[in-house]
Image (spheres, rainbow, N blue to C red):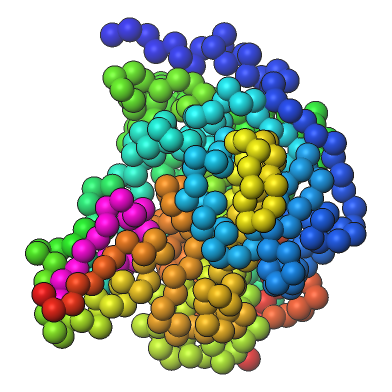
Amino acid sequence: MAVDNRFAQQHWEKRNGESPGIRSEIVTGPVANWATDFSHAEPEWAADPYSIQDDLRQRCPIAHTNRFGGGWLATRYEDVAAIAHDTEHFSSRSIIMGNFRPPRELAPAGGSPPITSDPPFHHDARTLLLPAFTKTAVGKQEPAARQLCHSLIDALDGRDVVDGAADYAHHIPVRVIADMLGFPAQDGPQFREFAKNTLEGINLPTQERVTRKSALFHYLLAQVHDHLENPRDDLTTFLINAELNGRKLDVSHVVGTMTLLLIAGIDTTWSAIGASLWHLAKYPRDRERLVAEPELLPTAMEEFLRAYAPVTMARLVKGDMRFGGVDMKAEDWVLLSFPAANRDPAHFDRAGEVVIDREVNRHAAFGLGIHRCLGSHLARMELQVALEVWLQRIPSFSLADPSAVSWSAGQVRGPRALPLRIGD
Amino acid sequence: MKLQIDVGLCQGHGRCYDLAPSLFGDDEEGYGKVLGDGAVPPEKEDEARRAELNCPEGAISLIEGT
């Protein structure tokens, strides 16, 4: 058998330097006008994106900014859906709107297949992973997730005030994805740092971003080497052995996909669980109803996903074009706000209200089109188990200090500090 | 009444087999599939409509009178 030298040092060293691509000027500070200068990285956005989005949807449904080298923000369901489905004019080469555009040559694979991939490559890269993320496949993780939730709640015993985000929600996706990738469970705290750097560090100085990205790359490469020496039944070994068109994946594909699986599932699911707990702490009537009618939880959960959709995606405009009454230029960013689409009154009745028994809920929390969240079945399983176990064990809780709740900025929104008072 | 999934539109969100598991299943890649011949018995028409109305891609159609 030939030695697998794809992961030898000389093959990835070139990645480690300053990567080619276009960097734009970092612009921070208060937003003057959300229609012409928006920024999803500012504290006003983190504090309340919904009123900003509702306002824009009415007066400027495709807003613009010169920050991040130029970009657009779509807030109507119709526009978000159209862009998500239009892979001919909008590229996924980078899906995090920041001050760095990877080189065009990176398409159609992009840095983290398949989320950063365009057709036709996208289909093959995605099909490779789909069987591992079906509802049936992720169901195998459910008993361990349930047990973890119980042990997290056991550990809260005796405390009046706990942090629903840091003490509970955070740990669930971290542990599940560590198990699926075959990474040591004790490395969980590092994963959170990796995710935060990738998603919330968009306005950090370039060198800092490169250094942090490099730390993640080296961590993943060390995991690859560990799996080469000790192959086991997990996604890392699967990716190392996987083939596309009769060829094993190259190092950038293997590590890029590992990056995606590690980063994409952590902050997103954590955010969905945290936002749901926040809602239930704030609205006792909904909490009491779900405790009394646990069979309503799957329906309520979809409503939490609609109203508090954690994820916004980005695209890059492929060539100059007219869209929705604006002139988009090649390489402009477009933010696909699934949270804003989910609150569009043209698509949902009582769009701004949380209706936990909403029967018809065609929301876009997991995206639309060919990039539908690969982990959506996993996320739903984790969210359902996390809420079920919490409500069984802690049926009564409230916000301990509403002003101490803090929400993340950027493209993944969820509570990062959520002090909850347990009991009546 | 008969159910159909447009395979060109289905992206594997799985709302149909979540909401109407006696009418829909998933394939090995998680895409939805209609179970049996797609015929909907009268007592399951509400379930079928619920699946149709909740598909984020609008991939499900209900053909009346069949």
- In this orientation, does residue A340 appear? yes
Magenta-tinted stretch: B1-18
Q: Quadrant of the N terminus of chain A?
A: top left
Task: Name the residue rendered at 41%, 78% in the picture.
Answer: A360
Task: Name the residue rendered at 74%, 28% in the picture.
Answer: A22
A275 vs B54, nearest the viewer? B54
| Residue A209, placed above or below residue A266 | above
| Residue A309, placed above or below residue B8 | below
Q: Quadrant of residue A317?
A: top right
In the shown orientation, is residue A387 left or right of residue A25?
left
In the shown orientation, is residue A24 left or right of residue B12?
right
Q: Is residue B12 magenta?
A: yes
Q: Position of residue B20 (x, y in %)?
A: 25, 72
| Residue A227, placed above or below residue A297 | above
In the shown orientation, is residue A270 left or right of residue A378?
right
Q: Position of residue A376 (x, y in %)?
A: 43, 56
Q: Position of residue A263 (x, y in %)?
A: 57, 44
Q: Quadrant of the C terminus of chain A?
A: bottom right
In the rendered picture of this protein, how many numbered marks are placed on residues? Answer: 0
- In this orientation, does residue A199 appear? no
Task: Name the residue rendered at 82%, 46% in the picture.
Answer: A66
Q: Quadrant of residue B45?
A: bottom left
B62 vs A3, nearest the viewer? B62
| Residue B2, placed above or below residue A143 | below
Task: Name the residue rendered at 65%, 38% in the picture.
Answer: A320
Q: Position of residue A280 (x, y in %)?
A: 58, 81
Q: Is residue A138 magenta?
A: no
A42 vs A262, nearest the viewer? A42
